[in-house]
């Protein structure tokens, strides 16, 4: 399943575009460069105004299956858009380029092929897009069932870490104490690094669990075969 297709310069350009597009680098751009960001182009729904507050189209006070349906409907545009972009860049060879360039890093780090690199980057900005891309990789045979499980464990904790952190978490860095000192003194990048490290740690816990389970199953099958032969 490792790369077989020859990749030209177009594949690497498509890969670079994909990394920039899903990375969130231009998510806060207030100029034309915002068109290079996934979340900016995905946009947002309008608001239903209910005095004295404004909310999104889902509204407030919903429950049951109907509320769940509206929440699911909220996810569809971003997921469909992400899969459409992946289909385009895949046509130009971006996934194969990712396999070639990223597998030497992704295999030792989490035991998954480099083709998961785009889904990894996307998952840091949009949990929904990352999950949809991972499913697409499994359905197309790019990754195995165990690799999908490992990678899903990476995505499970703190999905959409970059967007959520910079939109909400950074507010903590503006807090001050009563004597006007900064309340949070660690650099802003440190918590983000900690989040990523523990996401990788969680993926490797699942990797270890699956390996140990596979070994037990192989041992059990081997003993069963020996008993049958006797």
Image (tube, rainbow, N blue to C red):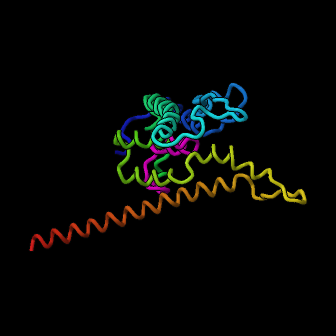
Seen in the image, is 24 located left or right of residue 228? right
Q: Is residue 41 above or below residue 216?
A: above
- Which residue sits at x=45%, y=51%? 151
Which corner quadrant holds the C terminus? bottom left
Q: Could you tell me which quadrant the N terminus lies in?
A: top left
Q: Is residue 21 visible?
A: no
Nearest the camera: 46 or 65?
Answer: 65
Measured along the vertical axis of the image, is residue 187 above or below residue 167?
below
Vertical arrangement, residue 196 with respect to residue 14, above or below:
below
Q: Nearer the viewer, residue 2 or 177?
A: 177
Q: What residue lies at 71% left-to-right and 32% top-to-bottom?
A: 51
Secondary structure that dominates the magenta span: helix
Q: Give how far across and how far down residue 13 sits, in percent.
A: 54, 31
Return the residue nearer the eye: 93 or 169.
169
Which residue lies most toward the right here?
179
Give the x, y percent position of residue 40.
Answer: 62, 31
| Residue drawn at point x = 40 percent, y = 35 percent | 6
**Residue 43 image-quadrant placement:** top right
Q: Which of these two is toward me, 143 or 71?
A: 71
Residue 126 within the magenta-colored segment of the rendering: yes
Q: Is residue 197 above or below residue 113?
A: below
In this rendering, position of residue 205 left or right of residue 58: left
| Range covered by the magenta-colored residues | 107-128
Residue 36 horizontal/vertical position (percent) = 62, 30
- Taking the view exactly as shown, the residue that stands out farthest to the left is 230
Q: Determine the image quadrant of residue 58.
A: top right
């Amino acid at each position: 399943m490792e790369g077989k297709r020859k990749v030209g310069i177009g594949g690497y350009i498509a890969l670079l575009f994909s990394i920039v597009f899903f990375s969130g680098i231009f998510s806060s751009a207030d100029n034309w460069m915002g068109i290079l960001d996934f979340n900016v182009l995905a946009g947002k729904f309008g608001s239903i105004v209910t005095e004295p507050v404004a909310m999104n189209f889902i509204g407030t006070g919903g429950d049951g299956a109907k509320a769940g349906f509206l929440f699911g409907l909220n996810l569809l545009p971003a997921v469909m858009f992400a899969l459409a972009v992946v289909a385009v860049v895949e046509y130009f060879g971006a996934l194969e380029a990712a396999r070639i360039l990223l597998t030497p890093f992704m295999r030792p780090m989490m035991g998954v092929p480099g083709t998961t690199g785009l889904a990894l980057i996307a998952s840091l900005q949009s949990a929904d897009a990352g999950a949809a891309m991972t499913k697409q990789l499994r359905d197309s045979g790019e990754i195995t069932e165990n690799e999908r499980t490992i990678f899903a464990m990476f995505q499970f904790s703190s999905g959409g870490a970059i967007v959520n952190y910079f939109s909400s978490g950074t507010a903590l860095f503006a807090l001050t104490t009563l004597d006007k000192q900064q309340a949070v003194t660690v650099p802003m990048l440190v918590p983000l690094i900690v989040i990523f490290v523990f996401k990788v740690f969680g993926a490797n816990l699942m990797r270890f669990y699956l390996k140990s389970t596979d070994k037990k199953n192989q041992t059990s099958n081997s003993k069963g075969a020996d008993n049958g032969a006797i």
